[in-house]
């Protein structure tokens, strides 16, 4: 139990240390990109589950991210003012599903509240993930990769071709999301530190929950599926049901990240649903070692952070592709595994040496 | 314009698109059946073929430029296999698929920095931009006939190669049962290199013949790869004829969906049908369900 | 425990990389910092790449001539790759960290719209290089743009149609921001201009062949002209496919046709294509006393000799954006952002590549209808269209 707590405590310490360091160095503005990177990493965490534990590739996580972001963005920016006088709108308003507010130019609008939009996004994502995952995961082989690729393509084209989703310009003017208890998801620089903690807190919770899931009965079953599916089937594990559960959970996490980031940046564009984005998530999960949630989330946060700060300039994609090839070629289980082995060998070597020293000087 | 001619024109338009997808799908299929890898970099072979041929065409006559491009890209294909896939042969197929994704990104970015962001194209092989062949009142560009001709010749040659030559038979053996092939003394690694080289060459050839129609840009590979991928799956993996059929089918579906739906959604209908086929007939329309259709990996 | 050590090592690496960047210098005679967000790579690279090249060239030239108000000019270029979320990130970075005086770009209207509100809230001067009308309409105090308006391009096209006796047209456009904005504009302005749109189709910007859509257009009776609103390569494909299927009506293109390369790619199929564009492409035909002549000729010569490629109107938008900022600084005589903004809002008679800018508080583009010229393709070259 204690052993399991160590990484969590350490991670929390890292999160705090980074913030303190940033503030001390007067580089608090770095936290903006770090917050965005953390949101993107959530998608990768979910994907790790699908790839590392269920042994499937999903090329549609960008689409789930976009479904989450777009559902929330559309509902919270579209004005339903004309429906204000209908009886059901009155009820919904009392339930705080509809809220009255002012738009950028001060005219009154009635939109869906962020909480209700979030719920709607979850429901839409759940349905989409189920419809894609259910048939694809009953088949052996990499059908999920193909089905999700087709699915992602469809989502991307619909987003690009539909006026309600803002077509190529995307949606702007998404309001901030007041979570309650003084917590607000907003990109305003005054709330930067708060939002950094919010994002990393949510990410940490997801990590812990996923960690528990992996160690639960579901996780063990998945491990069995990954190692030897036929044997797992023979032992009475309903492999497709487990795979479907994991797929849906990870799709929901991607959608949560989409909703949060959309509120954070105040908008969403069609590039979020592009195939390249989905491929990026897959690559980041792979670069982190797939089955290693901690290392994948660290690596993807780091790479996304650097990319969002334009470290690589026009070489952004090139660096990213090269990194992926190198990591997969040299350390297919993620760079932290050989690093860990190396540290262990080094420390045990050191122990041996100090032991020898002790021996020499009695 | 009568409605029969209209339908014929849509059909020809679909064949134009479909022939391009088919060209990509054949190469895709070849690597898959020989190695089990879904090669996401296949589109980059097509792009490289077009780019290199355009560059060479400044110095050499067109046929030499095309041949040169095909040879160079085939060498690149072999080299990639030797450098990245051979050392990884003990890793899972999943890792190899992800490597192809990385390669695709790197090749694309390299093309951006070697050439630039501009659009290039080869001249039309016969005629020019406005010439067309009339078929019962509907028109088609002569370049499409070049593409169709290239596909036919490639498929026939591929068929002869796979059926009647020792190398080709060995490749088929690797595809249907790698362990048994190894026991029979076939060098599986070399077969893989050959498959990569061949499919890169096919991709490059495709890139050259479609270049006058679609034009070539550093980014042109990825969308072609996705369509080619869809075409290969729709037709059924593991069979070059099925890939061609799948490609033409997707092109025709797109063209006819334009006649009924807003054109913005034409890809949507193509991919929706793909999903449907995938769920109802997982091994593709023309693939065999014996497990050869999609290999387990 | 192993995990603990790994994490500790990771932390050290992480914090090393995280903050290893950016140091503000407190120099007295510091350069004027201007941020630029261009999509140098990615799907909009045909815009971003010439913009970046132009800006780098222009900055070198200005600094060689002694800079502005005795300060050197420093432009920090960020490559957004066409992604809005990167544009948002870079806009925050440029305004909060680099503390730039103004941001020029982004290249696409989608990205510009995503950061419009952000810049307005942070009182950051933004000079967009994107064309969409909604960037400056409604007017945001700190947001300007340099390309001509879509509505002006449409006015020119409709005017030319009237001269030619065309009243029934088909519209085809691509599914990117440029195509969507143009399509909207055409739909809105058709009725008042007495033009009827018989067919209206949107296609994928990466389409490889468009004969199906043009077949649909051909099947509609009475179409007298086709208007295509897109960028390369689709705009060349439209021209070719129209001729191939025998759709022999005049083809009008948008001002996105502004690169001689595109006409070359369509070959003989581009002959007779009509499109509105700035005068950069026909600088040789301008009379010697034209206010833009000297500037255009110099830009064209410098660019083409430095980069060995044809100059395009897109690079010109970045030229104008930088020019507007620097003229604003000169006029304001200070580096105070609000004063520079006020000066820019009152710039009059400034000759740029797109036209002569006359900014007002209501008009943050400042270009009149005469910024355009109707061009046509003759023998593979752009020339002014004469009735």
Image (spheres, coloured by chain):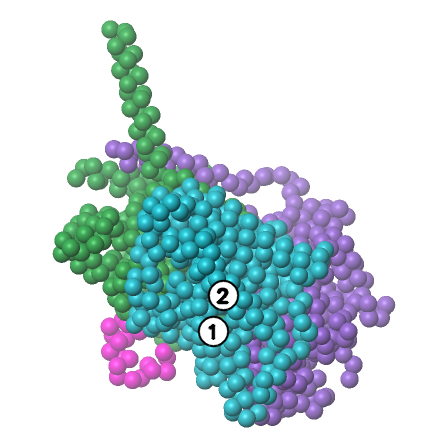
Q: Chain of mark 1?
A: B
Magenta stretch, residue numbers: A80-104
Q: Chain of mark 2?
A: B
Q: Nearer the viewer, residue B63 or A282?
A: B63
Q: Position of residue C314 (x, y in %)?
A: 66, 64
Residue B59 in which image quadrant: bottom right
Q: Colour of chain A?
A: green
- Please identify the residue farthest to the top as the structure is shown: A362
Residue A162 in which image quadrant: bottom left
Q: Could you tell me which secondary element the residue under label 1 belongs to?
A: helix
Q: Which residue lies under the disc numbered 1?
A: B248
Instruction: Using residue C345 as the reference point, say whether residue A347 is left or right of it.
Output: left
Instruction: Give the Cα separation between the discs numbered 2 and 1.
Output: 14 Å
Which residue shows up at 42% across the image and 55% down it? B169
Q: Position of residue A48 (x, y in %)?
A: 31, 51
Instruction: Using residue A360 as the reference point, say whether residue A2 is left or right of it.
Output: left
Q: Colour of chain B?
A: cyan
Q: Nearer the viewer, residue B11 or A290?
A: B11
Is residue A100 one of those drawn in magenta? yes
Q: How many marks?
A: 2
Label 1, residues with CA under 10 Å away: few <14, some 14-19, many ≥20? many
Which residue shows up at 32% across the image and 32% down it? A341
Q: Could you tell me which secondary element the residue under label 2 belongs to?
A: helix
- The chain coloured purple is C
Q: Could you tell me which quadrant the C terminus of chain A lies in?
A: top left
Q: Which residue lies under the disc numbered 2?
A: B155
Q: Position of residue C5 (x, y in %)?
A: 31, 32
């Amino acid at each position: 139990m204690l052993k399991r707590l160590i990484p969590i405590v350490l991670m929390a310490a890292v999160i705090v240390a980074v913030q303190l360091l940033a503030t001390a160095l007067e580089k608090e503005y770095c936290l903006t990109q770090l917050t965005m990177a953390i949101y993107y990493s959530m998608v990768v965490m979910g994907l790790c589950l699908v790839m590392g534990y269920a042994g499937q590739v999903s090329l549609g996580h960008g689409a789930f991210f976009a479904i989450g972001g777009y559902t929330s963005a559309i509902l919270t920016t579209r004005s339903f003012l004309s429906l204000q006088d209908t009886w059901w709108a009155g009820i919904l308003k009392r339930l705080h599903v509809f809220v009255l507010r002012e738009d950028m130019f001060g005219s009154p609008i009635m939109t869906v509240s962020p909480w209700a939009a979030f719920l709607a996004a979850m429901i839409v994502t759940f349905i989409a993930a189920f419809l894609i995952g259910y048939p694809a995961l009953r088949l052996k082989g990499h059908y999920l990769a193909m089905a999700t690729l087709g699915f992602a393509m469809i989502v991307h084209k619909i987003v690009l071709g539909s006026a309600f989703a803002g077509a190529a310009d995307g949606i702007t003017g998404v309001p901030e999301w007041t979570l309650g208890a003084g917590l607000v998801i907003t990109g305003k620089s005054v709330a930067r530190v708060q939002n950094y903690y919010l994002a990393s807190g949510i990410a940490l919770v997801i990590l812990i929950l996923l960690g528990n899931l992996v160690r639960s009965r579901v996780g063990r079953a998945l491990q069995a599926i990954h190692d030897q599916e036929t044997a797992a089937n023979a032992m009475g594990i309903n492999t497709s049901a487990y795979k479907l559960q994991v797929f849906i959970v990870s799709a929901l996490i991607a959608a949560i990240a989409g909703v949060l980031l959309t509120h954070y940046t105040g908008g969403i564009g069609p590039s979020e649903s592009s195939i390249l984005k989905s491929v990026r998530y897959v690559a980041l999960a792979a670069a982190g070692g797939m089955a290693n949630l901690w290392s994948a989330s660290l690596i993807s946060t780091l790479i996304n952070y650097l990319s969002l700060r334009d470290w690589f300039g026009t070489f952004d994609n090139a660096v990213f592709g090269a990194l992926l090839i190198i990591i997969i070629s040299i350390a297919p289980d993620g760079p932290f595994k050989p690093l860990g082995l190396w540290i262990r060998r080094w420390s045990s070597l050191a122990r041996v040496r100090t032991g020898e020293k002790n021996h020499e000087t009695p | 314009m009568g409605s029969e001619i209209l339908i014929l024109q849509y059909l020809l338009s679909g064949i134009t698109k479909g022939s391009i997808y088919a060209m990509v799908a054949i190469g895709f299929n070849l690597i898959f059946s020989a190695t089990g890898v879904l090669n996401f970099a296949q589109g980059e072979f097509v792009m490289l073929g077009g780019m290199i041929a355009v560059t060479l065409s400044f110095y050499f006559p067109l046929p030499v430029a095309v041949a040169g491009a095909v040879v160079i890209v085939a060498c690149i294909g072999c080299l990639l296999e030797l450098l990245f896939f051979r050392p990884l042969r003990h890793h899972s197929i999943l890792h190899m698929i992800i490597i192809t994704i990385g390669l695709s990104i790197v090749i694309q970015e390299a093309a951006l920095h070697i050439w630039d962001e501009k659009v290039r194209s080869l001249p039309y092989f016969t005629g020019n931009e406005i010439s067309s062949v009339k078929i019962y009142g509907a028109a088609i560009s002569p370049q499409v006939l070049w593409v169709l001709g290239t596909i036919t010749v490639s498929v026939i040659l591929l068929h002869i190669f796979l059926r009647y030559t020792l190398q080709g038979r060995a490749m088929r053996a690797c595809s249907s049962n790698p362990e048994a092939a190894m026991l029979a003394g076939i060098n599986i690694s070399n077969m893989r290199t050959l498959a990569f080289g061949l499919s890169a060459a096919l991709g490059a050839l495709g890139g050259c013949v479609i270049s006058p129609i679609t034009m070539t840009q550093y980014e042109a590979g990825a969308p072609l790869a996705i369509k080619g991928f869809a075409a290969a799956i729709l037709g059924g993996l593991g069979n070059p004829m099925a890939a061609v059929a799948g490609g033409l089918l997707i092109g025709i579906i797109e063209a006819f969906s334009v006649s009924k739906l807003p054109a913005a959604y034409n890809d949507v209908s193509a991919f929706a049908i793909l999903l449907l086929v995938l769920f109802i007939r997982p091994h593709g329309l023309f693939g065999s369900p014996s497990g050869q259709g999609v290999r387990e990996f | 425990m192993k995990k603990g050590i790994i994490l500790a090592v990771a932390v050290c690496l992480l914090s090393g990389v995280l903050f290893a960047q950016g140091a503000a210098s407190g120099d007295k005679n510091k350069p004027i910092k201007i941020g630029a967000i261009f999509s140098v790579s990615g799907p909009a690279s045909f815009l971003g790449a010439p913009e970046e090249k132009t800006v780098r060239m222009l900055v070198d030239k200005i600094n060689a001539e002694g800079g502005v108000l005795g300060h050197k000019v420093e432009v920090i270029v960020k490559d957004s790759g066409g992604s809005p979320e990167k544009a948002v990130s870079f806009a925050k970075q440029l305004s909060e960290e680099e503390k730039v005086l103004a941001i020029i770009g982004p290249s696409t209207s989608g990205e510009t719209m995503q950061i419009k509100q952000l810049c307005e809230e942070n009182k950051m001067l933004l000079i967009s290089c994107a064309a969409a009308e909604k960037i400056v309409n409604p007017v945001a105090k700190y947001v300007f743009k340099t390309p001509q308006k879509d509505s002006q391009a449409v006015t020119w096209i409709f005017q030319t149609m009237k001269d030619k006796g065309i009243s029934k047209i088909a519209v085809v456009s691509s599914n990117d921001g440029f195509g969507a904005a143009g399509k909207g504009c055409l739909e809105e302005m058709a009725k008042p201009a007495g033009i009827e749109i018989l067919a209206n189709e949107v296609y994928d910007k990466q389409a490889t062949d468009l004969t199906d859509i043009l077949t649909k257009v051909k099947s509609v009776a009475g179409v007298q002209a086709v208007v295509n609103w897109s960028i390369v390569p689709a705009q060349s494909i439209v021209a070719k496919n129209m001729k191939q299927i025998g759709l022999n009506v005049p083809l009008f293109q948008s001002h996105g046709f502004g690169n001689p390369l595109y006409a070359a790619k369509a070959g003989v199929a581009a002959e007779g294509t009509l499109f509105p564009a700035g005068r950069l492409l026909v600088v040789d035909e301008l009379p010697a006393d034209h206010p833009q002549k000297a500037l255009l000729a110099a830009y064209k010569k410098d660019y083409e000799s430095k980069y060995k490629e044809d100059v395009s109107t897109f690079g010109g938008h970045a030229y104008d954006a930088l020019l507007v900022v620097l003229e604003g600084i000169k006029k304001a005589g200070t580096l105070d952002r609000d004063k520079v903004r006020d000066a820019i809002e009152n710039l009059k008679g400034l000759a740029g590549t797109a036209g002569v800018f006359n900014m007002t508080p209501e008009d943050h583009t400042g270009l009149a209808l005469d910024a355009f010229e109707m061009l046509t393709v003759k023998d593979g070259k752009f020339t002014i269209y004469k009735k």
